[in-house]
Image: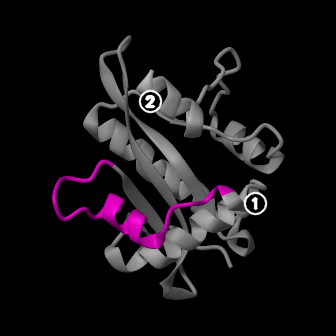
Amino acid sequence: MRVDKPIVRNARPEDVPQLFGFVVDLAEYEREPEAVVSTADMLRHALFPSDREPHVWAHVVVDPADPKRLAGAAIWHLNFSTWEGHHGIYVEDIYVRPELRGHGYGRALLASLAKICFERGYRRLQWSVLDWNTPSVDFYRGLGAAPLEEWVGYRLQGNELTELASG
């Protein structure tokens, strides 16, 4: 079923179980299910903290066949370019249920984030994708997104992070 205009909205606390399910599904797709050590409660606290403003947000797209079911979501946070002197959005996760892909939901999610960038004067909408994930790479290129081929991501975590912090 094709929907003319997908319904994208801010995530609500009651969406967290489905959002966390997307996180787990995405980790399984990316062949790292054991890497998920977070919980739905941790995600709820990150998105809807009671003691401060959030630093992580989520937008969801509603399944047109069942308004209580989410078709997909984008979980994101701000980044900052010192060269441009402006914030941007970094999409941590974007996920659309496999059976609903190809109906414009992923595009609608990214378009909603692009609109936030435009409205707030942010200069970038950025994310990462595994190089073997050809369907996603093709989708992103189809939107006009360009890979950052000269940039290589690095990460410190676990023991290495602890060693550097204590050293």
| Cα gap from disc 2 to disc 1, whole angstroms | 26 Å
- Amino acid carrying label 1: it is Tyr
Residue at (30, 48) in percent of width and height: 55
**Taking 34 as reference, is 4 above or below it?**
below
Residue at (42, 76) in percent of width and height: 15
Residue segment shown in magenta: 35-55
Mark toward the start of the polypeptide (2 vs 1): 1
Horizontal side, residue 92 vs residue 77: left or right: right
The spot of residue 8 in percent (x, y) is 43, 65
Residue density around tag 1, few if under 14, some if 14–19, many if 20 or more, within 10 Å: few
The spot of residue 123 in percent (x, y) is 39, 27
- Amino acid carrying label 2: it is Arg
Q: Which residue is mark 2?
A: 124
**Looking at the image, how many numbered discs can be counted on the residues?**
2
Quadrant including the C terminus: top left
Quadrant including the N terminus: bottom right
Which mark is drawn over residue 29? Answer: 1
